[in-house]
Image (tube, helix red, strand yellow):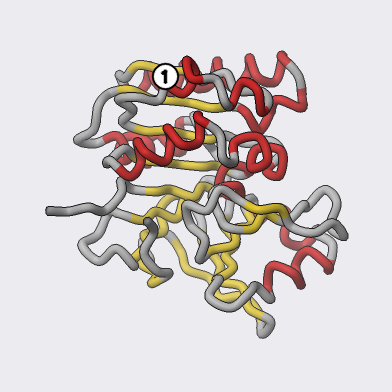
Amino acid sequence: MDNRPGPLALVGSGEYLPVMTEVERRLLEGRPPRYVQLATAAAPEGVDSLARWHRLGATSADRLGVTQVVVPVVDRVSADDAELAGLVQGAGLVYLSGGNPTFLADTLRGTRVWNAIEAAWRAGAALAGCSAGAMALTGQVPDIRHPFRAAVQGLGAVPQLSVLPHFDRFAGRLPDVVLTRVSNPPAGVTSVGIDEDTALVSGWRDDPAEWDVVGRQSVWVLTPQGREGHPAGSVLRLGAVG
């Protein structure tokens, strides 16, 4: 019996947009047509930003021919609401979209909604995070907006990775302290930069330690010695999740 969790995708950018449709389609393949979406990371930006994410998510669900399920978590209180946690049940894909990664991790960590997401994923649903969502799924989340602050505890779905999304656009403009920190991760952690419109996906191969690079650009392994690029179509050994 296969006790592995469902596929997990870390996406550099492009959630709910046509450029990433085939990634979302494959994540849903063979799973219930129930697309659970959390725009929680954008909650600090206000209701207009949340509404925009929900509209994009609805368009994506329509394009895929599946049902959109919005879980409207905006703070710790709503994240611990049993009724909202119940919306996750039966998910084929759970998606955490972009915004503020430290807010997202701090809001979901240890709550009923996160516990429901993790349980669904471990039972076989696909799980994806884009930009802030990808960062929050790791073990430690650097505060890019405030680089001298300590990293916050992530949600821990992929504790062996540290993620910098939008890597092609932002890497050259990030403060040195951020790049130094992510290029010198703790023992057992690999730092990766994920370009825009690109995803790093676990769970599509027989070997659970193998990850696929899919999309338009590349994934970069970051070390104190430099960066190593892996274009779409590459397979990286980065350790199993779950």
- Rendering coords of residue 79 (x, y %): 59, 26
Q: Residue 49, relative to residue 20: is it above or below?
A: above
Q: Quadrant of residue 234?
A: bottom left
Residue at the spot x=31%, y=19% of the render? Answer: 66
Q: Residue 105, relative to residue 212: is it above or below?
A: above
Describe residue 141's horizontal placement relative to residue 55 as left or right. Answer: right
Describe residue 120's horizontal placement relative to residue 113 as left or right. Answer: left
Q: Residue furthest left?
A: 1
Q: Nearer the viewer, residue 18 or 76?
A: 76
Residue at the spot x=40%, y=25% of the render? Answer: 88
Q: Quadrant of residue 185?
A: bottom right
**Secondary structure under the numbered disc 1 in the rendered image:** loop
Q: Is residue 22 visible from the viewing direction of this image?
A: no
Amino acid at pointer 1: Leu
Residue at the spot x=31%, y=37% of the render? Answer: 125
Describe residue 142's horizontal placement relative to residue 198 as left or right. Answer: right
- Rendering coords of residue 187 (x, y %): 58, 78
Q: Residue 116, relative to residue 184: is it above or below?
A: above
